[in-house]
Amino acid sequence: MLIKSKKSYQLSEQQVTDESVYHSRRDLLKKLGYLGAGSLLAQSAASHASPIDFFSSKKEVVFQRQALTYAKADESAQILTPEAKITTHNNFYEFGTNKGDPVENAQKFNVNPWQLTISGEVDKPYTLGYDDLFKRFPLEERIYRLRCVEAWSMVIPWVGFSLAELIKQAAPNSKAKYVAFETLYDPKQMPGQDSRRIGGGVQYPYVEGLRIDEAMNPLAFMSVGLYGKTLPAQNGAPIRLVVPWKYGFKSIKSIVGIKLVEHKPPTTWNILANNEYGFYANVNPEVDHPRWSQASERRITTGGLFARNRIATLPFNGYGEEVAQMYKGMDLRKNY
């Protein structure tokens, strides 16, 4: 008898996110009326494809990625998360709320042409086109840990450039105290924006924000690729933010707008549940999520089906030496 087993990179929700945590976060959306029987029916339909589909000659559309030219990072002692796992286990509600939805629903995403506008309290506002994202600034590789608020983590070799350099070219004025970010709003391409059932009822477009000193920190990074190639659609193509000392939902994807502002900007998850998701969202093992512990995390590495890889979570995701001084004197239990 043959026993079929999953490939090591084919993760279920429960393998990476503790089952109670996964269901707890989705329960929040259900309580707010955003997920219901329709979502379950959609999942059921997706898992019971017609036999006709199997024999169809229709070619499957695959999002195209290109090799990048960049300065490679020094070798890291950290075990990288395999590319196949990074690209198949995603939170990108614009393409669906289940971890496998983005890779399934984003393959037709068109990112060229693209425009990223830098505006607001600046003397030199400007706009980057698609090609500019890869040519305006020297590209470099940075190997960062990514810690999800759901208590799982990855180690990812990003390719991109410093957020500070992008902001400096706009010449911020003295009123620029915060930086606001906005994701593309395109319901025709992003089914989660078009359907409350698919997108969890989140108020779109997705928005995020940083203080100006956070945005200018050398660790803050604009990624246009990973593993040496342009970003996959499901990982935030063509350009996304990476702030490694904060929980993953701060690293906004598919950005079209960066605006420097005087007052604290709204942020999507804080709007949705401000008692659970703060503006700062710094990784902090001493401040639990109201419905689960943040003291440890499940690191996604090369392990297979039964790999646990449970490790202790570090303050600021291990980047305290570079960022802790920005929060000196702040009560991080209140400013979570």
Image (tube, helix red, strand yellow):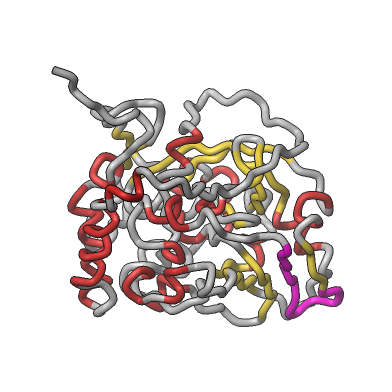
- Residue lying at the far right in this picture: please name it: 124
- Where the N terminus falls, by quadrant? top left
Q: Say which quarter of the image contains residue 32.
A: bottom left
Q: Is residue 282 visible?
A: no
- Where the C terminus falls, by quadrant? bottom left
Horizontal arrangement in the rendering, residue 47 relative to residue 178 (left or right): left
153 or 321: nearer the eye? 153
56 or 270: nearer the eye? 56
Question: Looking at the image, which residue is at 45% across and 69% down?
Answer: 191
Q: Position of residue 240 (x, y in %)?
A: 60, 57
- Residue lying at the far left in this picture: please name it: 1
Question: Looking at the image, which residue is at 32% across and 34% down?
Answer: 311
Q: Is residue 66 visible?
A: yes
Q: How many marks?
A: 0
Q: Position of residue 65 (x, y in %)?
A: 64, 44
Position of residue 212 relative to residue 302, above or below, is below
Question: Looking at the image, which residue is at 62% across and 65% down?
Answer: 255
Position of residue 41 relative to residue 262, above or below, is above
Q: Position of residue 153 (x, y in %)?
A: 40, 42
Would you say residue 155 sits in the magenta stretch?
no
Q: Position of residue 222 (x, y in %)?
A: 66, 53
Q: Say which quarter of the image contains residue 67.
A: top right
Question: Looking at the image, which residue is at 69% across and 59% down?
Answer: 216
Q: Say which quarter of the image contains residue 30.
A: bottom left
Horizontal arrangement in the rendering, residue 297 relative to residue 78 (left or right): left
- Residue lying at the far top in this picture: please name it: 1
Q: Which residues fall within the magenta stretch? A: 113-125
Horizontal arrangement in the rendering, residue 264 relative to residue 307 (left or right): right
109 or 304: nearer the eye? 109
